[in-house]
Amino acid sequence: VPMTTVETVRESYARCRQNPDFFDAFYDHFARKSSEIGPLFSNTDMQKQNELLSDAIVSLISFAKGDSAARQHIEEIRLSHDRYQLNIKPKWYPFWIEALLDTIKESDPDCTPELLENWQTVIQPGIDHILSFHSG
Ligand code: HEM
């Protein structure tokens, strides 16, 4: 992924984070995508989860430029989400991406359709990595 595209997305994420309700909105959108999603987080400390997800999105963005610390972090998430641990189903990942894009649209005042396409391009390699070897 071109460096300028990654930078554009990193700047968008900084603007999104100005919205204090960014993660509440994200989990709201995510839960609306399927009735299977909400219950996965019924015992989750959401304040802690939001912090972990915030760092993970930073790594998802840096993964696209081959950053090795980001790669290591995304590899840990792959392992925690695979079928032997959290067992997150591959069919839920498009919902996760859609929920993120819905939330960006509401949170980034400079959002454009092109920017949302850049987001898709930048996060896809990290998502593909999390899904790799999942089978099932
Ligand atoms: C943790 C679900 C995708 C990052 C979790 C937990 C669940 C979950 C149920 C455990 C919450 C708890 O501890 O109670 C899902 C679902 C996904 C998804 C259904 C998509 C279909 C992602 C993606 C990322 C991510 C794409 C990376 C950007 C994390 C992190 C944690 C976590 C950092 C906490 C640490 C860990 O358990 O690894 N997720 N997740 N998740 N998720 Fe996801």
Image: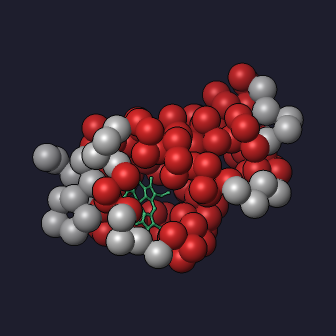
Up-down: is 7 above or below 69?
above
Residue 33 in view of the camera: yes
Q: Is residue 67 left or right of residue 79?
A: right
Quadrant position of the N terminus in the picture: top right
Q: Residue at x 41, y 71 (%)?
A: 44
Place residue 108 in its image quadrant.
top right
Q: Is residue 133 left or right of residue 64?
A: left
Q: Quadrant of ligand 1?
A: bottom left
Q: Is residue 72 left or right of residue 47?
A: left
Up-down: is 30 above or below 88?
above
Q: Residue at x 75, y 44 (%)?
A: 107
Q: Residue at x 28, y 46 (%)?
A: 36
Q: In this view of the protein, which residue sits in the foreground, 50 or 36?
A: 36
Q: Residue at x 57, y 73 (%)?
A: 47
Q: In this view of the protein, which residue sits in the foreground, 78 or 99?
A: 99
Up-down: is 58 above or below 135?
below
Q: Measuring from the top left, give residue 91's x and y in whole percent.
A: 28, 38
Q: Measuring from the top left, give residue 61's x and y in whole percent.
A: 62, 53
